Image (spheres, rainbow, N blue to C red):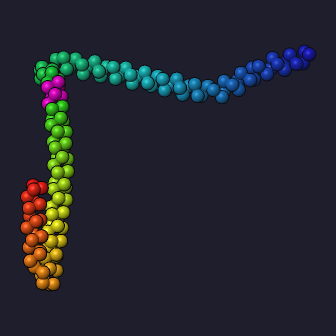
Amino acid sequence: MQEQLRTEELAVPLLSEGFLANWEPILKQIEEQLNELKDKQKLFLEDLKNTNSLMENQENYEYITLSFSKIPQYHTKLQNIRNTMMTMLSRSKNIKQRVSQLKLFKEQQFAQIAKKQQLIRREIEFGSFSTVTEDKDNDKNAEEVED
C-alpha cells in the first residue's frame, strides 16, 4: 500500500510536467497572439482618434455634411428613375406584343390574298373567269364588313 502511495506521489508531478510540457507552448502562442491583437487594436484606436480630430477640424466638414444631406433627394430621384424605367419596360412589352399580333394578322391577310390569287389563276386556266370575279366582289364586301 505504501508503495502504491509512493508511486502515486511520484506520478502526480511527472504527469503534471508532461501535461504542462504538452500545453505550455500552445498557451504561450495564444498569449502572444492576444498581446499582438491588443497592440493592433491600440494602434487602430489611436488612428481613429487622429482621423476623427482631423475631420472635425477640416474645412471640408461642411461640404461632407451637405453631401450627406442630399442623399435622401438622390434616393428619391433614383426611385423615380426606376419607376419610369419599369413603366417603359411594361410599355415596350405591350408594344412588342401588339407588333407580333399585327405581324400575324398581316401574314394571315397575305395568305388569304395568295390563296385568292391562286384560285383566280386556276379559274383563268380552266376558263371560268366570270364566277371568280363574282367571288372577289363577295370577298371584298365581307372584308369591308369586318373592318
Residue 27, position as x, y percentages in the image? 57, 25
Q: Is residue 83 visible?
A: yes
Residue lying farthest to the right in this orientation = 1
Residue 87 sits in which quadrant? top left
The quarter of the displayed image where residue 133 is located: bottom left
Asked which quadrant contains residue 138, the reply is: bottom left
Q: Nearer the viewer, residue 85 or 122?
A: 122
Residue 114 position (above or below residue 53): below
- Identify the residue shown where x is 20% and y is 47%: 93
Residue, x 11% and y 75% (percent of image)? 131
Residue 85 is inside the magenta segment = no
Task: Give how far across and how far down residue 5 sits, in percent.
Answer: 86, 16
Q: Where is residue 140 shown, x and y percent of the image?
A: 8, 64
Q: Position of residue 121 (x, y in %)?
A: 14, 79
Residue drawn at the location 85% of the way across and 17% of the way down = 6
Quadrant of image for the N terminus? top right
Total numbered labels? 0
Dominant secondary structure of the residues highlighted in magenta in the image: helix
Query: Which range is magenta?
Result: 71-77
Q: Is 100 placed above or below 66 here?
A: below
Residue 58 visible (yes or no): no
Left/right placement of residue 18 relative to residue 30 reads right
Q: Is residue 99 left or right of residue 2?
A: left
Q: Is residue 100 above or below residue 61?
A: below
In the rendered view of the protein, which quadrant contains the C terminus? bottom left
| Camera-side residue of 95 and 28 | 95
Which residue is more in the foreground, 98 or 3? 98
